[in-house]
Image: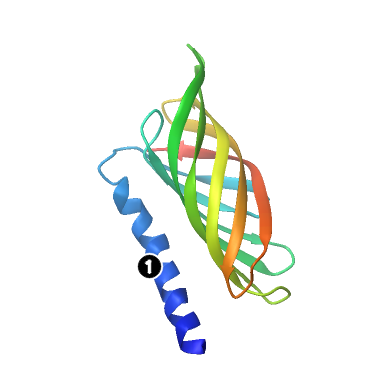
């Protein structure tokens, strides 16, 4: 059983690392801060209205680390003005949670949010991400937050 869990850990890490390659053909890359539950750094490949890949490396104060990768689709354009464009997005993903206080967990997640492209180089967003653990622990968890990214 331990061997199966080790292999699944390796597979999850490989999938998290491979997610950006689906969006590498797109020129937009964003790097920023994610504030919420958990808090961390976010990296994004691609931008609305096309698909994008979001990566998150985050932590909680209770000694919990999260790694998450999401493949997001633009659902609709909510509003478009000279100040910027607001999009509704969502998509599937995978995550890994490691903690000294809780059981480690890996599984699938969803991602739903609102993305505001303020300027050519600034993006603000808020999102909610329900997660279902499948490996080591089976539980439902909901995370979310707000953030910003500088777009290169």
Pinpoint residue 20: horizontal percent, then vertical percent.
35, 52
Can you tell which quarter of the image residue 102 is in? bottom right
In the rendered view, does 112 fall on the left or right side of 151? right
Can you tell which quarter of the image residue 12 is in? bottom left
Q: Residue at x 45, y 75 (%)?
A: 8
- Up the image or down, 29 lies above or below 3; here it is above
Compare residues 62 and 6 and report the one nearer the observer: 6
Pinpoint residue 149: horizontal percent, then vertical percent.
50, 39
Q: Residue at x 64, y 72 (%)?
A: 137
> Does the image show residue 114?
yes
In the rendered view, does 36 fall on the left or right side of 17? right
Pinpoint residue 86: horizontal percent, then vertical percent.
52, 23
In the rendered view, does 64 fall on the left or right side of 76? right
Q: Quadrant of the C terminus?
A: top left
Pinpoint residue 17: horizontal percent, then vertical percent.
38, 62
Compare residues 125 and 87 and report the one nearer the observer: 87
- Up the image or down, 48 lies above or below 40; here it is above
> Does the image show residue 55?
no
Q: Residue at x 42, y 61 (%)?
A: 16
Local secondary structure at mark 1: helix
Can you tell which quarter of the image residue 61 is in? bottom right
Number of numbered markers: 1
- Kindly give the residue lying farthest to the left in the view shown: 25
Q: Residue at x 39, y 63 (%)?
A: 15
- Up the image or down, 7 lies above or below 82; here it is below
Tell me if mark 1 has few (under 14), some (14-19) or many (20+) residues whose alpha carbon lies within 10 angstroms of its own. few
Compare residues 140 and 128 and report the one nearer the observer: 140
- Kindly give the residue lying farthest to the top in the view shown: 82
Display colour scheme:
rainbow
- Kindly give the residue lying farthest to the bottom in the view shown: 2
- Please name the residue that numbered disc 1 is placed on: 14
In the rendered view, does 12 fall on the left or right side of 96? left
């Amino acid at each position: 059983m331990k061997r199966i869990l080790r292999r699944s850990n390796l597979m999850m890490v490989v999938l998290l690392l491979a997610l950006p390659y689906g969006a590498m053909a797109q020129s937009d890359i964003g790097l920023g801060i994610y504030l919420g539950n958990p808090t961390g750094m976010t990296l994004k490949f691609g931008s609305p209205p096309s698909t994008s890949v979001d990566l998150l490396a985050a932590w909680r104060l209770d000694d919990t680390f999260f790694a998450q990768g999401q493949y997001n689709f633009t659902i609709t354009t909510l509003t478009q003005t000279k100040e910027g464009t607001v999009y509704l997005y969502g998509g599937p993903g995978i995550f890994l949670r490691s903690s000294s206080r809780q059981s480690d967990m890996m599984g699938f997640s969803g991602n739903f949010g609102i993305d505001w492209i303020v300027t050519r180089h600034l993006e603000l967003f808020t999102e909610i991400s329900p997660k279902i653990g499948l490996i080591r622990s089976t539980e439902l968890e909901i995370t979310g937050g707000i953030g910003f990214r500088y777009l290169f």
